[in-house]
Image (cartoon, grey):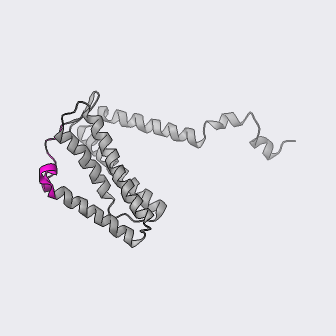
Amino acid sequence: RMTMSDVVLHPQRKPAIRWLSGAVLHWVGVAVVAVLLWIVPATTSEFFTGQLGRFLVFGLAALGLDLIWGYTGQLSLGHAAFFGVGAYAAGLILAKTEWPALGLVAIAAGILLPAFVAFVMGRVLFYGNVVGAYFAIVTLLVSLILEQTAISTIHLTGGINGLYGMKPLILGPFAVDD
């Protein structure tokens, strides 16, 4: 006579269901999204591709805010400062340099510089036990200081007019010129 535990733990039934595990489905989903994102520029208009890129970048910024607010309960009012540091790092490299591997350097700077700023700021705030409203105020102040610095350094950032004269971001055969 078979019981329910015999059916669930039967060795011949496990391999048939194992491929549906969470890890496998996760990576299948990642692969499907990657293929769709690879196909989008070839099958849609330039406007749609640009808009999708903007939506994905802002979605990534929102995920970063969700990580700090959702997991730690700390409201970061200056979260856009890291977004701006990354954008200015990549933009300044594209506008002011003539390096051959410009695309990879700009992307690396756009990731590593804000990560370093966030690491330093996080170390100071978290090890200084700055929490609650004080955390929100300090992050807002850092954001305002960085904004004022970007506006005040007209010779470097273009001030309130922003960066201009950027070269296209070139990654192998692809060029992003928007």
Quadrant for residue 125, please give it: bottom left
Q: Position of residue 177 (x, y in %)?
A: 20, 37
Q: 117 or 26: nearer the eye?
A: 117
* Residue at screen point 22% across, 33% down: 99
Q: Is residue 98 left or right of residue 40?
A: left
Start and end of the magenta stretch? 152-167
Residue 52 seen in this snapshot: no
Name the image quarter holding residue 47. top left
Q: Is residue 33 highlighted in magenta?
A: no
62 is higher (above) or lower (below) than 170? below
Front-most of residues 171 and 124: 124
| Residue 155 in magenta stretch | yes
Residue 4 falls left or right of residue 100: right
| Residue 19 in view here | yes
Picture quarter with the C terminus = top left
> Horizontal placement of 117 versus 147: left or right?
right
**Location of residue 21 in the rendering, given as x and y in whole percent from the top left corner:** 60, 41
Q: Residue at x 23, y 30 (%)?
A: 100
Snapshot quadrant of residue 80 = bottom left
Q: Is residue 44 left or right of residue 166?
A: right
The residue depicted at 26 percent of the width and 42 percent of the height is: 50
